[in-house]
């Protein structure tokens, strides 16, 4: 029997969407492997209702460890304790940096292997094979595991499917003796991500920052343009910018982000990759500023400006402000 353990990220009683996606996927795969999918909650205030709710997504059991949440060290100790109790072949994290950190550590501690940025999983020959995009996401590589297989998924890789709506599962409390390392880090404060509250789907004008912006700080160029337009203008980003940590995922346009259709889409340093295009091609007017005249975005832009965005965008913002008086 090969069970799969999923780390369930949660905040204020709500289980993270990506964790629910990982649970749904784990439940399907575990049944193919002849095992079960279980969820692990780590935190001081995890309610029965929150932990038990994963039954609706196919998990058959939830474990709860009372330890500080949000930092990797206690999670590694909690995973280690639960993995020691059962026949687990795999651990899945639904996405996010915690999966890289805690996943790498638990793989090392238990002599297993980790695959990160996983976008697909399948059962082959009685084992899980993880799919990972490589070479700038142009190819997919297969990862096979020796020993415990730890999978840190890419954000939004797995869809949360309520296969048993309303079902709840028993919640088992596990007492864990935390390692010394677990007490050395604590969350001092929790902040909101910049732009996380912006609903880019409702914006009439979207200023989209791509890798060409060059840094998180340079998103101020996009902010200034959006401010110049005013109204429902908002700032969004490509996946490259989001992956670089320059902009929150909530503002990502594309295949693994949001689909938008503003009156005006203005791309700053956006190449126009197909996975981005599918999320914005219905915009009424597409304007692109890119220094590479061969950038794919010019093939479907209504207006293309070839040049350095750092010179053009501030001048455009100033011109709009001047025109508005
Ligand atoms: C399964 C999968 C899902 C994906 N999902 C998404 C998704 O949801 N959304 C998404 O956006 N991408 C997605 N991608 C990634 C996508 O393939 C591209 O890698 C990404 O869109 C590229 O982002 P970018 O245009 O910001 O960066 P790049 O492709 O690196 O382009 C940067 C551009 O900036 C220009 N530039 C650089 N400096 C300047 C300057 N000073 N002035 C003007 N122009 C400049 C360059 O000429 C270049 O064209 C996905 C990929 C895969 C495989």
Image (cartoon, helix red, strand yellow):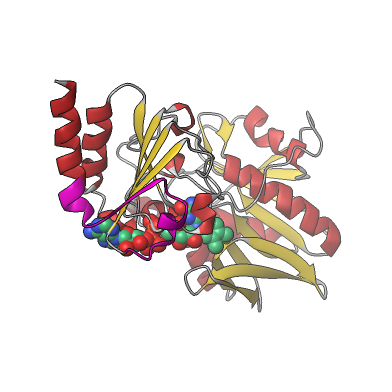
Question: In what quadrant of the picture does the N terminus appear?
Answer: bottom right
Q: Height in image: 115 above or below 194?
A: below
Q: Residue furthest bottom?
A: 146
Total number of numbered labels?
0
Q: Residue at x 24, y 29 (%)?
A: 227
Residue 248 on image: x %, y %: 39, 43
The segment highlighted magenta reads 293-312
Residue 307 on image: x %, y %: 23, 57
Residue 309 on image: x %, y %: 23, 52
Ligand 1 is in which quadrant of the figure? Answer: bottom left
Residue 272 on image: x %, y %: 44, 56
Verify whether residue 51 appears in magenta.
Answer: no
Q: Identify which residue, 307 or 74, lies in the foreground.
A: 307
Give the quadrant of residue 143.
Answer: bottom right
Q: Height in image: 265 above or below 105?
A: above
Question: In what quadrant of the picture does the C terminus appear?
Answer: top left
The reply, left or right, for residue 238 in relation to residue 141 is left
Q: Residue at x 73, y 41 (%)?
A: 161
The reply, left or right, for residue 267 in relation to residue 136 is left
Q: Residue furthest front?
A: 302
Q: Residue at x 72, y 47 (%)?
A: 24
């Amino acid at each position: 029997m090969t069970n799969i353990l999923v780390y369930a990220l949660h905040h204020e009683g709500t289980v993270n969407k990506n964790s629910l996606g990982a649970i749904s996927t784990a439940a399907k795969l575990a049944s193919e492997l002849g095992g079960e999918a279980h969820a692990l909650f780590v935190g001081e205030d995890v309610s029965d209702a929150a932990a038990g709710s994963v039954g609706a997504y196919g998990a058959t059991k939830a474990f709860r460890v009372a330890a500080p949440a949000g930092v990797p060290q206690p999670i590694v100790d909690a995973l280690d304790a639960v993995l020691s109790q059962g026949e687990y072949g795999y651990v899945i994290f639904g996405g996010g940096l915690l999966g890289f950190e805690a996943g790498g550590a638990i793989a090392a501690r238990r002599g297993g292997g980790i695959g990160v940025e996983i976008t697909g999983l399948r059962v082959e020959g009685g084992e899980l094979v993880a799919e990972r995009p490589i070479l700038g996401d142009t190819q997919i590589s297969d990862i096979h595991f020796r020993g415990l297989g730890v999978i840190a998924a890419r954000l939004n890789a797995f869809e949360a499917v309520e296969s048993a709506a309303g079902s709840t599962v028993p919640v088992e409390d596990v007492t864990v003796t935390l390692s010394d390392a677990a007490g050395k880090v604590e969350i001092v404060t929790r902040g909101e991500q910049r732009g996380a509250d912006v609903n880019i789907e409702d914006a009439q004008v979207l200023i989209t920052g791509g890798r060409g912006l060059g840094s998180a700080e340079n998103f101020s160029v996009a902010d200034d343009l959006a401010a110049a337009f005013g109204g429902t203008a908002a700032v969004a980003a490509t996946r490259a910018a989001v992956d670089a940590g320059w902009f929150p995922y909530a503002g990502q346009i594309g295949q693994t982000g949001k689909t938008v259709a503003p009156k005006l889409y203005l791309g700053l340093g956006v190449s126009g990759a197909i996975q981005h295009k599918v999320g914005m091609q219905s915009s009424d007017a597409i304007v692109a500023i890119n220094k590479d005249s061969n950038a794919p975005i010019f093939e479907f832009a209504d207006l293309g400006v070839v040049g350095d965005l750092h010179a053009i965008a501030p001048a455009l913002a100033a011109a709009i402000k001047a025109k508005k008086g």
